[in-house]
Image (cartoon, rainbow, N blue to C red):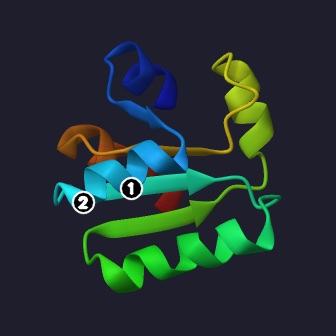
Amino acid sequence: MLSLARRAGKLILGLDDSRHLLQKGRSLVILADPELSPRTLRELERLPEENSGVRVYLLSDFQQTMEFLDRSAVRVVAVSDTGFRRGLLRLLAE
C-alpha cells in the first residue's frame, strides 16, 4: 500500500512535511519508527490530542519497510489521501 501511495505521489516523507499538512487542516495516518528520539516520540503522541484527524502508528518493522521503498533514512511517513488512508487503516487493523 505504501509503495502504491509513493508512486501516486501521496506519501508524505518526514515529520516537518506532515506537520505542514496538519496546519492546512488535513487528516493524516502517520507511521513512524519506534526508535525515534524520546522527544520526537512525545511530539507524535501529542498530535492526535491536538488534531482530531490524526492517527499515529509505531511500526516495529518500519526500517525494513523504508528500505523496501528505497527511503532508508526516513523515520516518519504519512498518508493524507482519503483512499490510501482508508486502505492503510484497514491493513493496520488486521
83 lies left or right of 43: left
Distance of label 1 from label 2 (alpha carbons): 6 Å
Q: Residues within 10 Å of mark 2 (few under 14, many from 20)?
A: few
Disc 2 is placed on an element classified as: helix
Q: Is residue 75 above or below residue 93?
A: above
Task: Determine whether 79 is above or below 43 in the image.
Answer: above
**Amino acid under disc 2:** Gln
Q: Position of residue 90 (x, y in %)?
A: 39, 54
Q: Which residue is mark 1?
A: 19
List x then y, in percent, for residue 80: 28, 45
Viewer-closest of 38 and 88: 38
The reply, left or right, for residue 83 in relation to residue 8 is left
Query: Looking at the image, how many numbered discs can be counted on the residues?
Result: 2
Q: Are marks 1 and 2 in contact (CB under 8 Å)?
A: yes
Which amino acid, by three-letter code, is at mark 1? Arg
- Find residue 2 and name its label: none
Tell me which residue sits at (24%, 59%) in the image: 23
The residue at the point 71 percent across, 73 percent down is 39
Label 1 Cα crowd, 10 Å radius (few <14 / some 14-19 / many 20+): some
Image quadrant of residue 54? bottom left
**SS at mark 1 in the image:** helix
Question: Residue, x 29% and y 76% (percent of image)?
Answer: 51
Left-right relation of 80 to 45: left
* Residue 6 seen anywhere in this rendered image of the structure: yes
Residue at 49% x, 31% y is 2
Location of residue 14 (image quadrant) = top right
User: Residue 23: which numbered mark, if any?
Assistant: 2
